[in-house]
Amino acid sequence: MTLVRSLLGLFGSDPAAPQTVDALLTRTAKAHPHAPAIGPLAGAIDFAELDRRVTRVANGLAAEGGPRDRVALIGRNSGEQVELLLGAIRAGQTPLTINWRLTPVEMAYILEHSGASRVFADTEFLATAQAALGGRDVPVQAIDGTGPADYRRWRDRQDNRAHPSSGTPGDVVLQMYTSGTTGLPKGVQLTNANVLASLAIFSLAPLDLDTGDVLYAPAPMFHITGIGPVLRCIQSGARLVLASGFDPGQAVETLARERVTYTTLAPAMIQACLASPAMDGADLGPLRVIVYGGSPIAESVLREAQERIGCEFAQCYGLTETTGPITLMTPEDHAPGRGKLASCGRAVEGVGLRVVDADGNPVPAGVTGEIQVGGPLVMMGYASDPAATAETIRDGWLNTGDAGYLDDEGFLFIRDRVKDMIVSGGENIYPVEVENAIQSHVGVAEVAVIGIPDARWGEAVLALVVPAGSVQDADAVLAHCRERIAGYKCPRQIRFVDAIPRNAAGKILRRELRKPFWEGVDRLVG
C-alpha cells in the first residue's frame, strides 16, 4: 500500500478507518484483545487490559477536569505513563510529556505557558514539579508512589464504563515543548490528523509492524521519537518494551531477552552497544531492523553493526513539528558503494520536500538552501504563539531551520543550520538559552555559545566567555549555569577570550566562531 492510499484511508474515503488516536487503540483492543501490549513478555498486559486501564484514566480525568485541559506528565518511560498519555487523549484532554531533566525554573515556564491543570510525576521528580508550580493550586500526583493518593490506586477507583469518545481529526492530542531561538520553549501542537498521517508512513516496509513484532523503546517520551513507539504499538498490535533510560549493556540484554524485532537508536547508542561486553555471545537473531536518526552513521560503525548484529538499517529525518519522520533512507540505500551514507534519505511518498533560497524560491539540485516540508504531518502550530507559527509555516510550507541540498536522485543532504541550534546526543540546544544562563554570572562580561564537532555526541556545547575582570573561574561559571538550565544544555567546556566578534548590528558572528572547529568537515553540523 502506498502512502497516498494509506492517507486516503485515514482521511475519509474509508468511513471505517480510524480517524483519531483513541480509535486506533479501540480497534486494536477489539481485534487483538489477548495479544501482549506493554511490558516484558513474562509480565506484559494485553491490549484488552490496556484499553480498560485507559478507560478508567479517561473517566477519572474527565470527572475531575474539563475538555482540552492540559495534563503534564513528568516521568521516565513506564506503562503507567502510557496509560496516562492515552487516557488523557480519550478524555478529550491534551497530555504534555515534559523533559524531567529540566530545572524548576525551566519547568515552571512550560507549566505556566501551557496552563497545565494537573501534574503526574515520578516520585523522584515530585520536588522539582512542586518547586516549578511555585505554590499554584495545581494537583500533583505520584505516578509510581505507594500511598493512598498514588496514581495506580486513583486509577483503579475510577468508573470502568466505556468513556464516550467524541474526538475529531483536528483535535490537539499532543503538546510537546521544544527549545526556542529566543530562549523560551515553544509548545508544538499535534493533532489526530498529524499523528495518523505519520503512522501511515510507518505502515510501509521496512518500517511496518504487526502483532508478531516487539518494539524496544529507550528514547524518553518527552521526545517525538519516544512517543512514536507508543503510537505504533496501538496502531499495529506489536508488543512494546520500554526502557527508563539508556544503558548499552542493559539495552543489549533486553534486545536478546525480549526477542526484539524493531528499535530506534541514535548512532551514538549503536556504537555504545557494539562496545559493550554484553554484545559477546548475545543472540540478536530476531532483530529485523534498527532505525536511526539525528546524525549520519559512520560507515565503520554501520559495517561493524551489520556484521555483528545482522539486521537491516534505515535512517529517518524529521522534527517534532512534522510529527516525526519526513525522509527515509532504506536498507538498500545503505549498500556498500551506494554513496548515500551522508544523506538522510528521500522524502517519503506523499510528503512535500523542497529546498529554497532566502526569498523562498526553490533551488536546483545540488544547491544548498533551507529545507521546507509540506503535507498533513505538519503541526497545527505553536500554542499561544501565532507570530512564531506564522514565521515557521508560510504558504503551507514549514521552514525546518536546516540547510541542505537535494541531489539529482532526490536524496537529502543536511549541510548546516539556518538557525543557531546545536544538536548534542539527539537533544536540541539553543545557544541563546545557554548564554542567558551564563550571562547572569557576575564574573561574565560577554558570552557566545557554539556547537563544535564531537565524535560521540555529534556536537558538543562550547562557551566562549569574556571575563568581567581578571578572575577566570570556569568551574564557578559551570556551577552557576547548572543551577539555571538542564545539565545536558550546559557547556562541555568554557574558553576565556578577549572579545566576542559581532556585526554592525551587534549580533554575534557565530559562523566565524565555528569556522576553525569545523575546518575539513564536509557536514557543518553533527
Image (cartoon, rainbow, N blue to C red):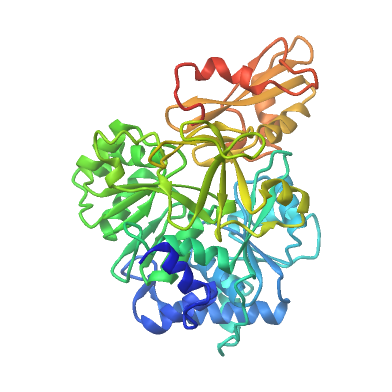
Which sits in the foreground, 356 or 255?
Answer: 356
Image vertical order of residue 127 relative to residue 210, above or below: above
Residue 220 seen anywhere in this rendered image of the structure: no
Q: Position of residue 216 (x, y in %)?
A: 37, 57
Q: Specify the quadrant of the image occupied by residue 158.
A: bottom right
Q: Specify the quadrant of the image occupied by residue 380.
A: bottom right
Q: How many marks?
A: 0
Q: Position of residue 127 (x, y in %)?
A: 68, 54
Left or right of 303? Residue 241 is: right
Which sits in the foreground, 35 or 388?
Answer: 388
Image vertical order of residue 482 relative to residue 9, above or below: above
Image vertical order of residue 507 relative to residue 59, above or below: above
Image vertical order of residue 28 relative to residue 409, above or below: below
Q: Position of residue 515 (x, y in %)?
A: 56, 17
Q: Position of residue 313 (x, y in %)?
A: 31, 47
Quadrant assignment for the N terminus: bottom left
Task: Determine the residue positioned at 50% across, 82% down.
Answer: 15
Left or right of 11? Residue 471 is: right
Residue 448 seen anywhere in this rendered image of the structure: yes
Task: Determine the residue positioned at 32% across, 55% down.
Answer: 254
Which sits in the foreground, 518 or 113?
Answer: 518
Left or right of 510? Residue 350 is: left
